[in-house]
Image (cartoon, rainbow, N blue to C red):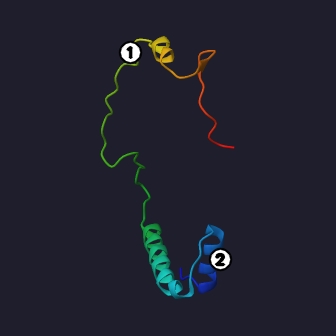
């Protein structure tokens, strides 16, 4: 798929990026190359190929879902600058 300068300008406007006049030539070449690679990938016959979650067929070791830490909430809240009703109070950072 070949892109035109109008296509590039339209994509740049949608992406909210500025493309200077001297950048259009190299950028068109790069984007056309990327789209060419995508066309090559789409041309590959993948019928009969099972999708993979990972390139290696490995079993994931899982640990038992058990609590390993003690509840230290009261200790943490005792040293917090401000706590109210079990919640940490923090300064407002967004107006």
Q: Pointer 2 and pointer 1: residues touching (CB < 8 Å)?
A: no
**Left or right, 3 with reference to 41:** right
Residue 91 against residue 46 in the figure, above or below: above
Residue 54 x %, y %: 36, 46
Residue 82 against residue 10 in the figure, above or below: above
Residue at the image position 51 percent from the left and 17 percent from the top: 77
Which residue, given by chain and number where applicable, does mark 1 sit on?
A: 69
Q: Give residue 3's quadrant in the image.
A: bottom right
Residue 64 x %, y %: 36, 19
- SS class, disc 1: loop
Which residue, given by chain and number where applicable, does mark 2 sit on?
A: 10
- SS class, disc 2: helix
Residue 51 against residue 64 in the figure, above or below: below
Nearer-N-terminus badge (2/1): 2
Q: Give residue 10's quadrant in the image.
A: bottom right
**Quadrant of image for the C terminus:** top right
Q: Residues within 10 Å of mark 2 (few under 14, many from 20)?
A: few
Indicate which disc residue 48 carries: none
Residue 38 x %, y %: 47, 70
Q: Residues within 10 Å of mark 1 (few under 14, many from 20)?
A: few
Residue 22 against residue 71 in the figure, above or below: below
């Amino acid at each position: 798929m070949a892109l035109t300068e109008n296509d590039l300008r339209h994509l740049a406007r949608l992406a909210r990026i500025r493309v200077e006049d001297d950048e259009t030539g190299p950028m068109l070449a790069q984007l056309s190359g990327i789209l060419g690679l995508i066309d090559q990938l789409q041309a590959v016959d993948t019928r009969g190929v099972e999708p993979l979650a990972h390139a290696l067929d490995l079993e994931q070791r899982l640990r038992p879902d058990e609590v390993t830490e003690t509840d230290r909430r009261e200790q943490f809240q005792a040293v917090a600058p401000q706590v109210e009703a079990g919640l940490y109070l923090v300064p407002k950072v967004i107006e």
